[in-house]
Image: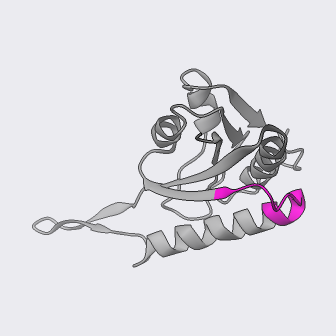
Amino acid sequence: MTKRRIVVGVEGSGYDRAALIWAIEEAHHRDAVVEVVTCYSPTYVPAAPDLGYVPLDSFDLLSEVEKMQSEVIESAVECADHPDVEIRKVVKKGRAADTLMAAAEGAAMLVVGNRGRGGFAGLRLGSVSQSIAHHSPCPLVIVRTGLAEDD
């Protein structure tokens, strides 16, 4: 039997950490797996009229994104203190809202922070929670953090 999935959007803002902690707690009670999804979009700039576009981001954006995701997961797992909860890591290239909704197909729920703040130029979350609120393929939880910026 396939375990239920709780999909969580993580992009390095601090808000996502609170969402992940919440999801781990919920997964513990529901006997579910937590699927941490991080989306990224490389930034391209024109090189020269005859050369087209070149990537603006660091040479290995994917490694930086994976490292950030691992750090957020490690911190959240430590806070939640539920080592029994299985965590799966997913990193996908694409727009955050579309990618998260695709990942959430068939999931028990989708969890995001109420705000995003890209730690890297290639990460996009911004108003994702507002965008997916209208189109989520499963129940959606938007975790409000209580961080000072939450006014």
Q: Is residue 132 left or right of residue 85?
A: left
110 vs 46, nearest the viewer = 110
Q: Residue at x 53, y 41 (%)?
A: 100
Q: Residue at x 64, y 34 (%)?
A: 129
Residue 26 to residue 60: above or below = above
Q: Identify the image quadrant of the N terminus.
A: top right
Q: Is residue 10 left or right of residue 45?
A: right
Q: Which residues are magenta?
A: 76-87
Confirm whether the magenta stretch covers residue 85: yes
Q: Is residue 120 left or right of residue 74?
A: left
Residue 31 in picture, x, y percent from top left: 76, 43
Q: Residue at x 66, y 33 (%)?
A: 109
Residue 103 to residue 70: above or below = above
- The quadrant holding residue 126 is top right
Residue 116 in picture, x, y percent from top left: 66, 48
**Residue 116 in sight from this viewpoint:** no
Q: Identify the image quadrant of the C terminus.
A: top right
User: Number of marks in the image?
Assistant: 0
- The quadrant holding residue 30 is top right
- The quadrant holding residue 26 is top right
48 vs 26, nearest the viewer = 26
109 vs 4, nearest the viewer = 4
Residue 27 in picture, x, y percent from top left: 77, 44
102 vs 150, nearest the viewer = 102
Q: Is residue 14 left or right of residue 125?
A: right
**Residue 1 in sight from this viewpoint:** yes
Residue 48 in picture, x, y percent from top left: 18, 69
Q: Residue at x 68, y 48 (%)?
A: 33
Which residue occupies the extreme left position in the image? 50
Confirm whether the magenta stretch covers residue 44: no
